[in-house]
Amino acid sequence: MLRHVIAPERFFTQVSNEIIRHPRLSAAAVRLLMWQLSLPASVDEPLWATAKNAGIKKGAFTLAKRELKAEGYFHEWRLQVAGGQWNTKQMVSNVVLSPEEAAALRDGSPQATPTAPEPAAGEPTDPSVGHYPTNTEGKKENPPSQPSHVPEPLIERGGLILASVSHKERRLRLNGRDIQQLAALAGEWLLRGATAKDLREALTDGLPARVHSPAALTRNRLTRKMPEVPAFTAPVTAPQPLRTCAGTCDRVFRPVAEETKCRDCRQEAAMLSAGGVGGLTVQPAF
């Protein structure tokens, strides 16, 4: 697939890959969010008006609004203003916000402002023509995501299990960057003999009603509940091949070590060798 991209120098909106490729947002929800984010700061347009301007029908708008709210990109409050009247205040964001973070931003609180997540997968290639706008935020280094001792297939499988847990348990929503960084820990579980069921139960059992940092909680549980390294067991040696007895019986037997005679012939030889002790003759028993 070839791509030719020229970044516009003005009148553009930066949208993260996480939003564009979000597995739980419909096309209408993505369009509605991108349209709202593209509006100038001076435009105070309610979400329903944006949906109308974007050509999103009423049913699709209702579903899109519900999806954006569930994923943390849209927040809405009913506030009482001067005179006792009630007013609806809405907020959209290009990053996931918890209700507490959104309320703090709404009220202008000096609490920590959430940072934009890394793209879910991949980075855009350099354009063949044109220039990118100046980036004033700088680059963020990604920490190493997987130790060398975990095989790549187990890391990949661990990532798939994390993605499955994230999809089924909304309190443990992980973006692509989170899964990439935690996949090696999940792979370590598999390397130590844990099953996919063990991993899912360790992550989801006893979850609190509200999880403020799914990635941090997942990392904590993967580290704290890590199974012990299985004890080393000596390899089972292969049995000796069958051989024909070198005694008088001509039987086929399986030796324990390097015996050349079967047990009966060895016993017979031992009894014969002890036959003259004390003047007694010992007859072999058949």
Image (cartoon, rainbow, N blue to C red):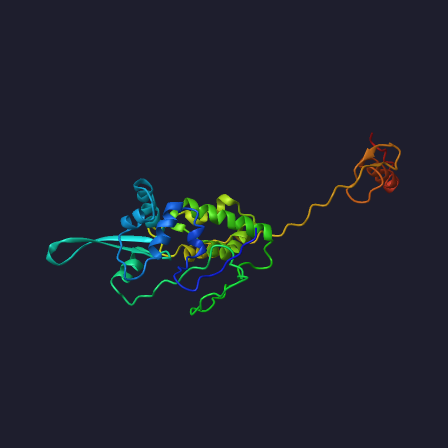
Seen in the image, is 128 located left or right of residue 262? left
Q: Relative to 10, is 149 on the left or the right?
A: right
Rendered view: 61 above or below 79: above
Viewport quadrant of the C terminus: top right
Residue 96 drawn at (x, y percent): 37, 56
Compared to residue 55, the image places residue 73 above or below, namely below
For this orientation, the residue located farthest to the left is 83
Image location of residue 114, percent across then percent down: 36, 62
For the residue pair 257 and 149, the one nearer the viewer reads as 149
Q: Nearer the viewer, residue 264 or 64?
A: 64
At 44% from the left and 62% from the top, the residue drawn is: 8
| Residue 42 image-quadrant placement | bottom left
Residue 236 locus on image (x, y percent)? 69, 45
* Drawn side of residue 154 relative to residue 272, left or right: left
Percent from the top left, x then y, of residue 57?
32, 42
Q: Is residue 183 visible?
A: yes
Image quarter for residue 91?
bottom left
**Which residue of the protein is positioned furthest toward the top in this rendering?**
286
Residue at left offset 11%, top offset 55%: 84
The answer to whether one can see residue 192 in this image is: no
Would you place residue 220 above or below residue 238 in this image?
A: below
What count of labels does the image hold? 0
Q: Residue at x 43, y 46 (%)?
A: 167
